[in-house]
Amino acid sequence: MDFRERLRDEIAFSGLSNKEVAAKAGITIRSLVSYVSSQACIPSAEVAVRLAKVLNTSVEYLVTGENSKTSWENSNEESRKLLYVYKNLPEAQRKLLLAVAEDISKCLGH
């Protein structure tokens, strides 16, 4: 996995659109697309730092795939998928899912 793929994955995981990420990072959508497309341009260090902040990760993780500073750095793929699904649910369904998960946890004695 390279920078382009990790950036693309982190954008998807964030639940933000490319347009939202670009706006929050202070770059054009065209620039962001060049970083995640087959052109695979690498942003300047300053832009990489802003992208990492928007995506709640580290530049080091985006560049090397190591030492993500997110709280989910050691999570497995199932945990990441669950969080992604949760983040993309409407508020009412989030509350329902959380209530169900809490009930299951109580039944299991956790």
Image (tube, rainbow, N blue to C red):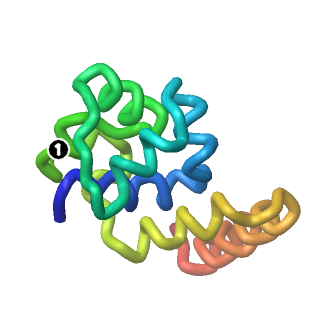
- Give the residue pinned by disc 1: 63
98 and 82: which is toward the camera: 82
Determine whether, in the image, residue 65 is placed left or right of residue 92: left
Determine whether, in the image, residue 19 is placed left or right of residue 90: left
Q: Residue shown at 30%/20% (left/top)?
A: 46
Instruction: Establish if 49 lies above or below 108.
Output: above
Residue 82 picture location, percent across and down: 53, 71
3 and 107: which is toward the camera: 3
Quadrant of the snapshot with the N terminus: bottom left
Mark 1 residue element: helix
Residue 34 picture location, percent across and down: 37, 49
Determine whether, in the image, residue 71 is placed left or right of residue 40: right
Residue 31 picture location, percent across and down: 43, 39
66 and 38: which is toward the camera: 38
Which quadrant would residue 101 be assigned to in this image?
bottom right
Instruction: Establish if 23 lies above or below 110.
Output: above
Determine whether, in the image, residue 46 is placed left or right of residue 104: left
Q: Residue shown at 22%/51% (left/top)?
A: 3
Disc 1 marks a residue whose amino acid type is: Val
Residue 41 picture location, percent across and down: 25, 46
Q: Residue shown at 52%/34% (left/top)?
A: 28
How many other residues sit within 10 Å of disc 1, few (<14), some (14-19) or many (≥20)?
some
Instruction: Establish if 74 lies above or below 63.
Output: below
Q: Which residue ends up furthest to the top in the rendered image?
A: 46
Instruction: Establish if 107 lies above or below 71.
Output: below
Which quadrant would residue 42 be assigned to in this image?
top left
Which quadrant would residue 74 be assigned to in this image?
bottom left
